[in-house]
């Protein structure tokens, strides 16, 4: 791809950006002072690479914020959107139906854990979580149990940025300032070695905390929410095997709902289609987003059991209706893209090919296992966090140094774009990424870390 014309060169684009754009999760004063790196101006994509305004190409090493599954400019998804665009771009689902939303709902019911029979559409992972928490509360309200309004969540959890989903989050960096606006949530520890010396011990402690809350406050909780297997935004904190299944059993015992937030973990990110499959459980509510459309368009969904759905059906005088929705709920173009993405997942054998790729990532990153500035390498499927430390076993860098950000910027010189979570370098390659490109991504990451700390 050739560079843009002179009147739209990189420097001009950067200045236009500075003049008007407010970037998410970005310290804007520092951005305005230091944004002279033209690699940040992405103008196109080609397969698993991104192309900047000077024509330079970079491997998309974090799936364009964890949502890209098949690469960029995928012919099948492009064509599905074009075909739908020739019919209609959007129609409302408020009192009307549309073929793309019907087809996608049927497909989702067919591939999610058995028992999730209803699909409620929204437009982002955060809104899918918001839908789930409102459904959980109103489900019990409709059953004449309005006191069931409490939620249990994990510390260091992240479920999105709406006020409701922030209430369920537990990361001070993102959530502390908004605490006066939030509703109260009961937080228990994260079941990982960050809080306890061993995974199994951690899981036992967390389950005991949940059990105590539920047993001592009967008929007050409506749901427990977890990111299944891996807490992403917390720095890729993996849960020990069996924890998710034990939480499912605990919620059933105490008649509370289980919400598994599969926004980040869904669609092959953990090596299976959904993280819940690893432990053979079906939640009551399951928010989906990010990879739902293959990384193309903002469509999300909240999967619900028929029991939940039936709790909202009744006579008009009973006022059981779920009064929630979005203008672009079930958007036709987005649903068409999602259906095409599901076709590709199936036709490409993505799930079957995942174990070999996951093993490749694990084996290659083993080269960093003894590096003095790598404290831990956490991996579940294609979700990887490489923790950077000042010295082992775990002396942290001064956060003001922004070591992770500096390292990820250095990686651009090796032709990759990755993004940190604090001082945890995140790799989130597209599950469809071919082995040659995957090896180049791993080569560049390993080389960058070794050079950065040389």
Image: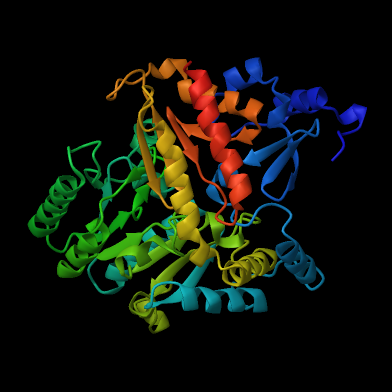
Residue shown at 17%/37% (left/top)?
Answer: 197
Q: Quadrant of residue 281?
A: bottom left
Whole-percent x, y for residue 186 in the image? 22, 47
Whole-percent x, y for residue 195 in the image? 21, 37
Horizontally, is 424 left or right of 210 in the view? right
Residue 323 at least partly seen = no
Choose between 205 and 368: the one closer to the eye. Answer: 368
**Structure colour scheme:** rainbow
Choose between 149 and 29: the one closer to the eye. Answer: 29
Q: Is residue 129 above or below residue 43?
A: below
List the single residue furthest toward the bottom. Answer: 315
Residue 234 at least partly seen = yes
Residue shown at 42%/81% (left/top)?
Answer: 316
Q: Quadrant of residue 215?
A: bottom left
Whole-percent x, y for residue 175 in the image? 38, 36
Residue shown at 55%/42% (left/top)?
Answer: 62
Residue shown at 48%/49% (left/top)?
Answer: 360
Q: Is residue 260 above or below residue 446?
A: below
Choose between 3 and 258: the one closer to the eye. Answer: 3
Horizontally, is 51 left or right of 96 in the view? right
Q: Is residue 335 above or below residue 384?
A: below
Quarter of the picture holding the N terminus: top right
Whole-percent x, y for residue 322 in the image? 43, 69
Choose between 328 and 29: the one closer to the eye. Answer: 29
Q: Quadrant of residue 137?
A: bottom left
Q: How many marks?
A: 0
């Amino acid at each position: 791809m050739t560079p843009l014309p002179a009147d739209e060169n990189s420097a001009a684009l950067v200045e236009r950006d500075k003049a008007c754009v407010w970037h998410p999760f970005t310290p804007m004063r520092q951005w305005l002072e230091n944004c002279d790196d033209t690699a940040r101006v992405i103008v196109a994509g080609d397969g698993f690479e991104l192309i900047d305004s000077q024509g330079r190409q970079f491997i998309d090493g974090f799936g364009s914020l964890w949502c890209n599954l098949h690469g960029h400019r995928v012919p099948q998804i492009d064509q599905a959107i074009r075909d739908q665009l020739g019919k209609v771009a959007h129609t409302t689902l408020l009192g009307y139906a549309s073929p793309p939303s019907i087809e996608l709902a049927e497909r989702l019911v067919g591939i999610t854990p058995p028992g999730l029979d209803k699909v409620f559409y929204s437009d982002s992972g955060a809104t899918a979580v918001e839908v789930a928490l409102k459904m959980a509360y109103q489900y019990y309200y409709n059953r004449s149990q309005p006191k069931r309004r409490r939620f249990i969540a994990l510390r260091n959890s992240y479920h999105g940025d709406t006020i409701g989903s922030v209430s369920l989050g537990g990361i001070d960096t993102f959530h502390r300032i908004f605490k006066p606006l939030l509703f109260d949530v009961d937080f228990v520890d994260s079941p990982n070695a960050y809080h306890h010396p061993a995974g199994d011990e951690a899981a036992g402690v967390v389950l005991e905390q949940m059990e105590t809350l539920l047993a001592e406050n009967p008929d007050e909780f409506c749901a427990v929410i977890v990111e299944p297997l891996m807490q992403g935004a917390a720095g890729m904190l993996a849960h020990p095997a069996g924890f998710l299944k034990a939480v499912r059993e605990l919620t059933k015992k105490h008649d509370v709902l289980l919400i598994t937030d599969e926004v980040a973990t869904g669609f092959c990110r953990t090596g299976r289609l959904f993280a819940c499959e690893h432990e053979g459980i079906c939640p009551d509510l399951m928010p989906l987003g990010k990879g739902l459309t293959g990384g193309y368009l903002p469509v999300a969904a909240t999967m619900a059991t028929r029991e939940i759905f039936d709790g909202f059906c009744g006579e008009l005088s009973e006022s059981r209706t779920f009064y929630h929705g979005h203008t672009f709920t079930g958007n036709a173009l987005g649903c068409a893209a999602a259906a095409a993405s599901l076709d590709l997942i199936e036709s490409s054998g993505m799930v079957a090919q995942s174990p070999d790729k996951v093993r490749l990532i694990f084996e290659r990153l083993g080269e960093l296992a003894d590096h003095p500035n790598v404290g831990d390498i956490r991996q579940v499927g294609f979700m990887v966090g490489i923790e950077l430390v000042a010295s082992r076993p775990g002396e942290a860098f001064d956060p003001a140094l922004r070591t992770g950000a500096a390292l990820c910027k250095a990686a651009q010189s090796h032709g990759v774009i990755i993004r940190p979570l604090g001082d945890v370098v995140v790799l989130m390659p597209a599950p469809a990424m071919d082995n040659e490109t995957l090896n180049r991504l791993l080569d560049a990451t390993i080389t960058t870390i070794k050079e950065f700390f040389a």
